[in-house]
Amino acid sequence: MRAKIRKIAVNIEETHSEIGRKIDPATRKAVAVAVIENPFAGTYTEDLSALMEIGAELGTLLGRKCVEALGITPEQAESYGKSAMVGENGELEHAAAILHPKLGAPLRKEVEKGAALVPSSKKMGSPGQVLDVPLGHKDAAYVRSHFDGIEVRLNDAPRANEIMVAVAVTDSGRPLPRVGGLTHDEAEGKDGLR
């Protein structure tokens, strides 16, 4: 089953200054969102494999859109995250089916490598509600400068029978990081942690 997409939105956030300090180069985050029909809205279905396949499709599509929006090559991506909001006729397990079994591998291809787990969140919601997308370094989970997030909101999604699926990618960590720990330049990306 392929995703029945009603709309796609892509946003870029750039931070050029923080607390009176210039950020050069600016830190940048992109988030791509697909609003899709929930094929299992209003019913209990034991086999959610169709949503898992949709997750794989969206991992490629949304990851690519983020990289393109940032105007970077895949290897220049530094962090990523994923999130989904299910409309009122769905269930949280529908979001889990999209996000977890198969979305990660195609996303990793779009950002080249991705040894670390892709941070994720899921929730039930209604049109206009904020969806938070957590972010973490794509190759080394212990890189604290990349613990971050981005919000996305669409005024008309998700409707009751829809799922809003978001993927975020950055080309940098937070502006002015100074809480210590492993740095991006020190990360080896062999075990997904360091």
Image: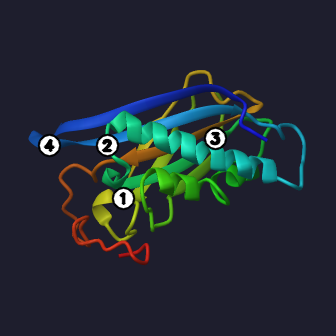
- What residue would you read off at disc 2? 72
Among numbered discs 3 and 1, the one appearing first in the sequence: 3
Among numbered discs 1 and 2, the one appearing first in the sequence: 2
Q: Nearer the viewer, residue 152 or 8?
A: 8
Residue 30 position (above or below residue 97): above
User: How many C-alpha atoms fall within 10 Å of the one at disc 3: few (<14), some, or many (≥20)?
Assistant: many
Q: Residue 81: where, in percent of width, then height?
A: 48, 52
At x 53%, y 49%, the residue is 82
Among numbered discs 3 and 4, the one appearing first in the sequence: 4
Alpha carbon distance from label 3 to label 1: 21 Å
Amino acid type at circle 1 is Phe
Q: Residue 12: where, in percent of width, then height?
A: 36, 33
Q: Quadrant of residue 60?
A: top right
Q: Residue 83: where, in percent of width, then height?
A: 56, 47
User: How many C-alpha atoms fall within 10 Å of the one at disc 2: few (<14), some, or many (≥20)?
Assistant: some
- What residue would you read off at disc 1? 147
Q: Secondary structure at mark 1?
A: loop
- What residue would you read off at disc 3? 85
Which mark's residue is nearer the viewer, 3 or 2? 2
Among numbered discs 1 and 4, the one appearing first in the sequence: 4
**Numbered circle sitting on residue 186:** none
Q: Secondary structure at mark 2?
A: loop
Amino acid type at circle 2 is Ile
